[in-house]
Structures are given as C-alpha cells and as structure tokens.
Image (cartoon, rainbow, N blue to C red):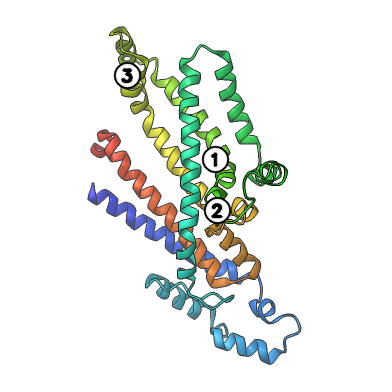
C-alpha cells in the first residue's frame, strides 16, 4: 500500500510541475504587467526600473528556472498588489474555502443520499418525481444565477440572511446552498444508478428472504457495495466545490481562494495567480491520493491488483 501511494505521490508531483510550467508561460503571454501597475502614462524609464526591480528584464528561461527552484522550496513569490508572500496570502484564504466546500458537501449529502435511497424503495410516485426534479433543476441552473436569485429572495426581499461576507455565522448558508445544488443533482443521479445495480444481486435477495428490515438490507448490503462509485464522485465533487467556486465566492464576497484568484487575474498579479493555480492543483492531487487510500480500505480486491 505504501509503495502504491508513493507512486501516486510521484505522479502528483509531476502534475504540479506541469501546472507550474504552463502557468508561468501562459500568464506571461497575456501582456506587460508594468502597464497595469504603473498605468499607461508611465514613462519608459519608470517601466524599465520596475522590470529591473522585479527581475523581468532577464531572459525568460532564467526567470523560469528561478521560479521553479523557488517553488520547490515553498517560495511562491510576492504579490504585486500588496507585497506580501503569495503563499501566506493563500494560506489565509484556504480555511474559508474549505469551510464553504465542507458545508456545501454536507448539505448535498444530507439531501441527495436519502433522496436517492427513498426514491428507490418508496412506492410513492411523488418522491420519485422529486428526485427527478432535483436532478433536472440542479444540473440546469447556473450557480451565479441561483446565487443572485437567493440574494434577492432571502437578503433583499425577506431580510433573513446576509448577502455576503463572512462576519456572521449564517452568512455561509446562501453560498453553501448555491454550491450544493449542483452536487445534489450529481450525487442523487449516480447514487440512484449504482444502488439500482446492486439491488437485483443474489445476496440482496437473500437478505430480503431472511426477513431483514429495509434499514439492515440497505445499510449492510446495498450501500456498502455501491459506496466506491459514490465515494469517487463525492471526492471529485469536493475538489470541484473547492476549486470552481470562483463565481460563487465572488457573488457572495466570500473571502476564499476562488475570489482571491479572480481578483489576482483582474490585477494581473502574476505571482498570486501562479500561486493560486499551484494551490488548487495541490488540493486536487492530495484529494486524489486520499481517495486512492480510501479505495484500498473499502475494497481489498484493489489492493491485490
């Protein structure tokens, strides 16, 4: 198991190296940052002085080697906006993004799994229709549109919840619900499909023949055997919630990684954008490795392969 995880860790390191390389060259292809920092009316001497001070007058390959070697030591550069280390800026924002993604995932699981199981075992057409509506609505509704709709309904019209920020404990409700809607649809659809594949199996019919209750049949025989696919999707969705919450964090002024990355792109803050891409990629790599470790615990046959 340790050898397998070591290989996955090596692959993840290679992925991060590729992301760092692409980010370095693609960001520098967007234009001259001195125009944005000093303005269009800056003199050539002032722009040249800034290039010299930032080391941008050196050959590109020299800048790249310095960047990669510094990143390997944990130095992701300093923000051009406030001069602070980019790694420190993101370290301050990561807890907010993890908090938002975690709450959104808990909301999604609390709704999607009971809805998927209930719609399969219930004979009530209304519950099945509710599951289908949840899937259709969740997959067809853009997050930014839903976020604005929730702000208008619960903040502007009713005044029940704050429209943004992180100062109040209930400020997380609207952005978490906005993020959770898409995940509810995805998890509900996959869970229904995987559970429906397991239900006709012989061991499940044997459990029913023994007279076991629905809770024991589904809790002991159905859900554990359908869990690998569900765990895979849940892990992927958590990474998506963390890394793709740029619009939601911007709409609700949530001080997370996504909002910081969006602001850095607008400012053309090269070091902060590069650091953000590496941070998000690092989270994806770590979550994938943790998922692989969880696979080995859930299904011993994977360990044998």
Lower sequence index among marks 3 and 1: 1
Of residues 12 and 130, which is closer to you in this image?
130
Dividing the picture into quarters, in which one does residue 233 lie? Answer: top left
Say whether residue 20 is left or right of residue 206.
right
Tag nearer the camera, 2 or 3: 2
Q: Is residue 52 above or below residue 170?
A: below
Residue extending furthest right?
Answer: 41
Mark 1–mark 2 CB contact (< 8 Å): no
For the point 35% across and 49% down, which residue is it?
A: 289
Q: Residues within 10 Å of mark 2 (few under 14, many from 20)?
A: few
- Residue at mark 2: 168
Q: Secondary structure at mark 1?
A: helix
- Residue at mark 1: 180
- Where does residue 146 sit, x and y in percent of width and height? 66, 42
Say whether residue 38 is left or right of residue 20.
right
Q: Is residue 19 visible?
A: no
Task: Name the disc covering residue 264, or none.
Answer: none
Say whether residue 155 is left or right of residue 185.
right
Dividing the picture into quarters, in which one does residue 261 lie? Answer: bottom right
Real-space Cα separation, disc 3 to disc 1, in angstroms: 28 Å
Task: Name the disc covering residue 216, or none.
Answer: 3
Of residues 233 and 184, which is closer to you in this image?
184
Lower sequence index among marks 1 and 2: 2
- Where does residue 175 sit, x and y in percent of width and height? 58, 47
- Where does residue 267 sit, x and y in percent of width and height? 64, 70
Real-space Cα separation, disc 1 to disc 2, in angstroms: 20 Å
């Amino acid at each position: 198991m340790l050898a397998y995880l070591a290989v996955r860790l090596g692959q993840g390191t290679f992925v991060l190296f590729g992301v760092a390389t692409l980010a370095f060259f693609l960001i520098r292809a967007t234009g001259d940052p001195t125009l944005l920092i000093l303005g269009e009316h800056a003199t050539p001497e002032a722009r040249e002085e800034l290039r010299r001070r930032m080391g941008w007058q050196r050959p590109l390959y020299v800048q790249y080697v310095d960047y990669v070697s510094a990143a390997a030591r944990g130095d992701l550069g300093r923000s051009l906006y406030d001069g602070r280390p980019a790694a420190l800026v993101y370290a301050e924002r990561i807890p907010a993004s993890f908090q938002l993604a975690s709450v959104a995932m808990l909301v999604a699981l609390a709704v999607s799994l009971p809805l998927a199981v209930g719609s399969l075992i219930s004979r009530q057409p209304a519950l099945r229709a509710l599951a289908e509506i949840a899937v259709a609505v969740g997959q067809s509704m853009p997050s930014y549109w839903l976020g604005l709709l929730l702000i208008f309904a619960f903040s502007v019209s009713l005044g029940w919840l704050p429209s943004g920020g992180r100062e109040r404990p209930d400020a997380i409700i609207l952005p978490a619900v906005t993020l959770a809607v898409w995940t509810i649809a995805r998890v509900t659809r996959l869970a229904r499909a995987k559970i429906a594949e397991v239900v006709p199996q012989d061991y499940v019919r044997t459990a029913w023949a023994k007279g076991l209750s629905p809770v024991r049949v589904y809790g002991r025989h159905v859900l554990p055997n359908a869990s690998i696919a569900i765990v895979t999707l849940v892990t992927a969705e958590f990474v998506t919630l963390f890394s793709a919450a740029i619009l939601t964090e911007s709409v609700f002024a949530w001080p997370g990684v996504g909002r910081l990355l969006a602001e850095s792109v607008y400012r053309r803050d090269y070091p902060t954008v590069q650091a953000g891409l590496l941070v998000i990629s690092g989270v994806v790599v770590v979550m994938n490795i943790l998922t692989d470790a969880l696979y080995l615990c859930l299904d011993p046959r994977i360990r044998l392969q």
